[in-house]
């Protein structure tokens, strides 16, 4: 399938540099059987039924962006995926100046030794010392804002809270599951009053989620892998909701991809723990979810392909054209869309 089928014009002033305040004040474009309408995230409960279930990703974003030196060379590293107790794969800026065995000093007493380069271009970094890497990152790292935000402003102290969801409890992500950024305690209370259930899973979002789609055809794209887990109790709850006639609605594409990875051809969700590199494009038959709350995605991205698979490419192109014309805010800190096929 040609990648350019998923292109669309997007003015740069539509890219949100800060989230809405309060978080649930973000706009929400709803697509369902009734058509398309403009709402606000705080009205989400009005769009759902008693017995539906929202599924959240409880991953916590690490301050996984590091700036350091190797000799006279300045080196930037964005951690991508854990490879061991003290080792992470990282996408390295100025990586041609780094050889296997080189030691990179990231300041604040944090250093690492470079290892081999992986097929995806990342370099293995093994951190020195005995402290948990998470503590080292808290000392020396910055929040890894998406490139389309970082190109326009630097990460700051406010991003430490803004780029973290209220569900974040399990360390390991280097990018936020951004659809869940819209949720507040007040919104969760309204959903509970409506009779909407919640469940949580873990998928550690990697920096590969920001890699541009370079292939001209989707068949030639190699999807990045991310680690996720759905425990047996959560799988049972997801199955029970659908058996009772409720809908399983993923909050974010990370939750959706993990649920689909854990669901068999029979529509049953099973416990899952490991890597998933699922790549969803039009023609895919969804097995484990009945809807999706998600932000607005980049042109020609794997995530725009995913929402096109869920709702139809023509319908999503029309929805995104409406969003651009209507001043919706795009990407990680932007507005939301509720997709109910």
Image (cartoon, helix red, strand yellow):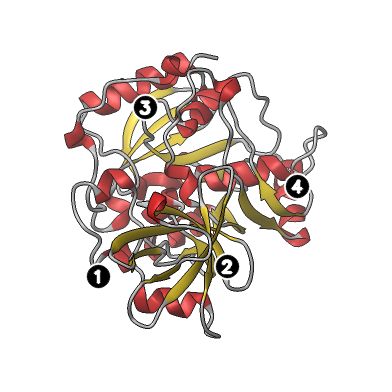
Q: Which one is earlier in the sequence, the residue at label 2 or at label 3? A: 2
How crowded is the residue under tag 1: few (<14 C-alpha within 10 Å), some, or many (20+)? Answer: few
Q: Which one is earlier in the sequence, the residue at label 3 or at label 1? A: 1
Q: Quadrant of the image for the C terminus?
A: top right
Q: Nearer the viewer, mark 4 or mark 2?
A: 2
The residue pinned by badge 1 equals: 157
Q: Which one is earlier in the sequence, the residue at label 3 or at label 4? A: 4
- Determine the CA span between mark 3 and mark 4: 34 Å
57 left or right of 39? Answer: right
Direction bottom: furthest residue: 130
- Residue at (77% x, 54% y) in the render: 271
Q: Which one is earlier in the sequence, the residue at label 4 or at label 2? A: 2
- Residue at (48% x, 34% y) in the render: 303
Badge 3 marks a residue whose secondary structure is loop
- Residue at (80% x, 32% y) in the render: 265
Question: For this rendering, which residue is in front, 287 or 16?
Answer: 16
Q: Are marks 3 and 1 in contact (CB under 8 Å)?
A: no
- Determine the CA span between mark 3 and mark 1: 29 Å
**Residue 59 seen in the current view:** no
The residue pinned by badge 3 equals: 299
The residue pinned by badge 2 equals: 87
Q: Position of residue 93 (x, y in %)?
A: 36, 52
- Determine the CA span between mark 2 and mark 1: 26 Å
**Residue 322 seen in the current view:** yes
Q: Position of residue 328 (x, y in %)?
A: 25, 35
The residue pinned by badge 4 equals: 239
């Amino acid at each position: 399938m040609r990648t350019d089928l998923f292109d669309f014009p997007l003015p740069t002033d539509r890219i949100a540099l800060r989230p809405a305040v309060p978080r649930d004040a973000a706009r929400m474009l709803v697509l369902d059987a009734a058509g398309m309408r403009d709402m606000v995230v705080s009205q989400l409960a009005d769009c759902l039924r008693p017995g539906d279930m929202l599924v959240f990703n409880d991953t916590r974003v690490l301050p996984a962006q590091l700036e350091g030196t190797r000799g006279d060379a300045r080196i930037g590293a964005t951690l991508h995926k854990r490879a061991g107790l003290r080792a992470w794969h990282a996408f390295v800026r100025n990586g041609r100046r780094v050889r296997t065995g080189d030691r990179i000093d990231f300041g604040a007493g944090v250093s690492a030794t470079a290892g081999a380069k992986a097929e995806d271009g990342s370099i293995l970094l093994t951190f020195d010392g005995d402290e948990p890497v998470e503590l080292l990152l808290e000392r020396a790292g910055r929040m890894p804002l998406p490139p389309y935000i970082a190109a326009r402003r630097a990460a700051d102290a406010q991003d430490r809270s803004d780029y973290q969801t209220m569900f974040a409890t399990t360390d390991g992500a280097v990018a936020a599951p951004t659809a869940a950024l819209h949720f507040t305690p007040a919104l969760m209370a309204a959903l509970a009053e409506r009779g909407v259930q919640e469940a949580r899973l873990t998928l550690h979002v990697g920096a590969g989620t920001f890699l541009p789609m370079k292939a001209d055809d989707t068949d030639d794209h190699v999807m990045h892998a991310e680690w996720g887990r759905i425990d047996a109790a959560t799988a049972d709850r997801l199955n029970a909701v659908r058996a009772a006639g409720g809908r399983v609605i993923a909050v974010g594409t990370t939750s959706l991809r993990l649920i689909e990875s854990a669901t068999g051809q029979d529509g049953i969700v099973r416990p899952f723990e490991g890597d998933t590199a699922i790549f969803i494009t039009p023609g895919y038959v969804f097995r484990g979810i009945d809807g999706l709350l998600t932000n607005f995605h980049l042109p020609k991205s794997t995530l725009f392909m995913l929402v096109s698979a869920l709702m139809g490419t023509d319908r999503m192109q029309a929805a995104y054209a409406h969003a651009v014309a209507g001043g919706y805010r795009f990407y990680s800190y932007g507005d939301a869309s509720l997709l109910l096929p």
